Amino acid sequence: MENNFDTQSYLDMELLRFTTAGSVDDGKSTLIGRLLYDSKSIFEDQVEQIEQTSKKKGLEHVDLSLFTDGLKDEREQGITIDVAYRYFATPKRKFIIADTPGHVQYTRNMVTGASTANLALILVDARNGVIEQTKRHTFIASLLQIPHVFVCINKMDLVDYSQEAYDKVVKEYTDFAAKLNVKDVRFIPISALHGDNVVNRGENMNWYEGGTLLHNLETVHISSDQNLRDCRFPVQTVIRPHSDEYHDFRGYAGRVAGGVFKKGDNVVALPSGLESKISGIHTLTGELEEAFPPQSVTITLEDDIDISRGDILVRSENRPEGQQDLDVMLCWLNTNPPRPRAKYVIKHTTAEARAMITEIQYKMDINSLHRLEEDKDIKMNDIARVKIRSTKPLFADDYNVNRVTGSIILVDESTNETVAAGMVR
């Protein structure tokens, strides 16, 4: 049989990362199952296995939620506990889905799954409308600066596909989202169980004139989500092959975190402040004239200057300020609370330093969006605004300007556990 699969065009396809969030029983797992099933992204043996399990449960239809609930506890309780990543592709785009839990005790899982997403897919039950968890998920999406939010109003079959029920949820959500910094919001009425408006349109909601969920996922404009103004290139490693062919080669490998780097550009290495010009931009498949986020490349410079892992290449006229005192919105990920005056390892892009939390300004009540200025007791899943002091200057941008260079993590030195993730203000 002839194989028409073109590896290069697959590799060149644009990748959309999206996270799903919704209350328990809003049908998140069923929706992802439907998306994979109707877009023919599931192997036949998996389909057979799920059909058999559905029959054993006495169901007349295929229980699509079983495609995503990978953990035994999830299948038994019918809930999502950990972040599950699913991969699929259509002829137009590649996708990574981070299926995150809905419960308040798994806020940290949602923060982790959503941190690299271009888009948040928030499910709302058409019967219940905007509830506390919908607000919490929207707040986290706005906090993490996810550029696009799709609100899928699910279970339309249970409200007789009523436009009135849909309009009511749209108004509730729009009124709430107006208080937050959420840029691109779209509403899609769906029935994940029956498949209406997920991959195919269906006949039941002719009053809805927008595209299906898959059509929106394939066409949403994401190439301008990255910061293309401020040039930032954190160096991951220095490449010195020491071979006869590349005897004098010295390249700096990493992933472009912002801006567009071109051959011949003047750049500065921080923290040293040494200047040079880009002589070449190399990849596995050959040289490039320019590099932009999120490409991984190796940059060579005209001058042999001292650069190592943790340094950052920037444009001469656009330098981030080195800061030792950071104002950070922190999500606490660990079961143990932060210890007073404890030293942590702070990781920012490829740079590392030691740091301590010097002040807790306030905690956020994720449900009411109120600041709790009296309550400074941070526990797992709490989000708080804190001051952090590091042992050396870090070249961080405001998280609102660049999600890569504006984020940090804290690691406990004694256990090597990541205890917190933060966004620099």
Image (cartoon, rainbow, N blue to C red):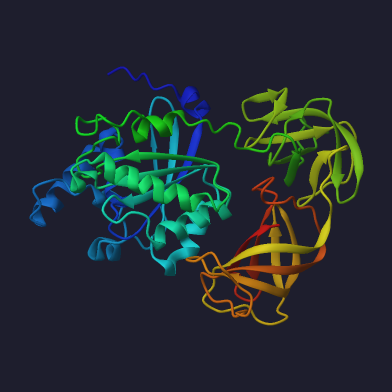
190 or 286: nearer the viewer: 190
Q: Report whether residue 70 is seen.
A: yes
What's the residue at 11%, 57% (across, down)? 57
What's the residue at 26%, 34% (across, down)? 38
Quadrant where the image shows the N terminus: top left
- The x and y percentages for residue 338 are 63, 77
| Above or below: residue 187 compared with residue 98 | above
Side (left or right) of 264 relative to 423: right
268 or 403: nearer the viewer: 403
Residue 213 lies in what quarter of the image?
top left
Most extreme residue toward the bottom is 340
315 or 52: nearer the viewer: 315
Residue 355 lies in what quarter of the image?
bottom right
| Above or below: residue 216 compared with residue 391 | above
- The x and y percentages for residue 285 are 62, 26
Q: Report whether residue 245 is seen.
A: no
Side (left or right) of 180 relative to 161: right
| Above or below: residue 369 compared with residue 263 | below
What's the residue at 89%, 42% (across, down)? 305
- The x and y percentages for residue 377 are 59, 80
- The x and y percentages for residue 318 are 84, 40
Quadrant where the image shows the C terminus: bottom right
287 or 223: nearer the viewer: 223
> For the image shown, how many numbered marks are present on the structure?
0
